[in-house]
Image (spheres, helix red, strand yellow):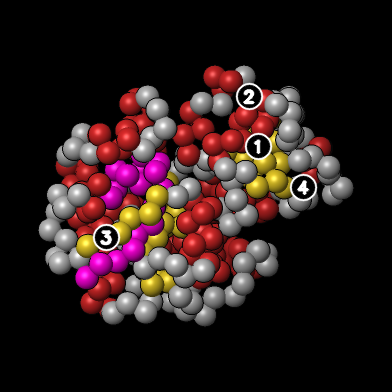
Amino acid sequence: MKLTLGFSPCPNDTFIFDALIHHKIDTEGLEFEVYYDDVETLNQKALKGQLDITKLSFHAFAYVANQYALLDAGSALGFGVGPLLISKNHFEGPADPQLQTANSNLKIGIPGKYTTANFLLGVAYPHLQNKQELVFSEIESALLNEEIDLGLIIHENRFTYQDKGLLKIVDLGDYWEKLTGCAIPLGGIVINRNLSREVQLKVNRLVRQSVEFAFAHPKSGIDFIRQHAQAMEESVMYKHIELYVNKYSINLGHEGRKAVDTLFKLAQERNIIPTIQENLYI
């Protein structure tokens, strides 16, 4: 049986899926047709129901929960891993009046409408509405070229913005952690509900085994990871992996599910996402 599978070319995803797609584990008769896309493209594909299994932002998941269920394996949650709001210009920290003004004209570059990063921005700074969607890797350049006033950065850009002279205004992950006490849910792996229960459980089991293999053999997928990492230094690649791949990637567990439930509860209370009737999980 062949299934379509979408994930990003970022080191955390290639680290997780290397063993699965390269048959370093027994895939129990399943084959995977892989699509590599940035997270917002994956979000859009999920909204159209184009893939059997896909990585997506938890924000986007709220809009497709009727069609997809969340695996317990493969998610990116954690502490100290949230998106950063940065700028080329100096601001007086998170409480700067310019960020709180109802009629703010500040232009913010965001990595996608349905990213969890944009969701958190809406929670922390609901008045900042002048948003421009950019590929996440282009946000730093847009700031340096003064095409935008603020940038919402994710992924490896957390490690590179300071080298370019850009300044952090607020860590939205830290904001979330103080607000809820939970890990921040960034992205998850979902599977189409039309697939049989047997296949859903098998895929969940295989993704978990793939993560466990990666942890047991961290250098096994180095060539594959580097191939997709956009000339990233190896030390940065592994910083990236350490940040986003952890115990929640093996199994959400009670803590992980609590974090996801808290995110969705808060988002529904603030009318950021629609009401969800389905059980989120497989």
Q: Which mark is residue 151?
A: 1
In the displayed structure, would residue 275 be above or below residue 165? below
Tell which circle, 1 or 2, labels the residue nearer the N-terminal end.
1
Q: Is residue 9 left or right of residue 207?
A: right
Q: Alpha-carbon distance for marks 1 and 2?
A: 10 Å
What residue type is disc 2 on?
Leu
Magenta-colored span: 1-17
Query: Which one is closest to the eye, mark 1 or mark 3?
Result: 3
| Residue 203 visible at all | yes
Residue 194 place in picture, x, y as percent: 37, 79
The answer to whether residue 274 is left or right of residue 6 is right
Residue type, numbered disc 4: Asn
Q: If the image is split into quadrants, where does the N terminus sit?
A: bottom left
User: Are the two marked residues, 3 and 4, in contact with CB atoms closer than 8 angstroms?
Assistant: no
The image quadrant of residue 72 is: bottom left
**Residue picked out by circle 4:** 130
- Give the distance between the C-alpha atoms of the residues marked 3 and 4, in whole angstroms: 40 Å
Spot occupied by residue 155 in the image (x, y as percentages of width and height) = 48, 39
- Tell me the number on the disc at residue 166: 2
In percent of the image, x 25 and y 67: which residue is there?
A: 2
Residue positioned 29% across, 66% down in the render:
3
Query: Cα distance, mark 4 to mark 2?
Result: 20 Å
**Counting other residues with Cα less than 10 Å from the Cα at mark 2, is it few (<14), some (14-19), or many (20 or more)?**
some
Distance between the alpha carbons at the discs numbered 4 and 1 = 12 Å
Task: Return the x and y of residue 265 as percentages of the image width and height.
Answer: 56, 67
Residue designated by label 3: 32
Of the numbered discs 3 and 2, the one sitting upstream in the chain is: 3
User: Which amino acid is tagged 1?
Assistant: Gly
- Mark 4 or 2, nearer chain start: 4
84 or 149: nearer the eye? 149
Q: Is residue 4 magenta?
A: yes
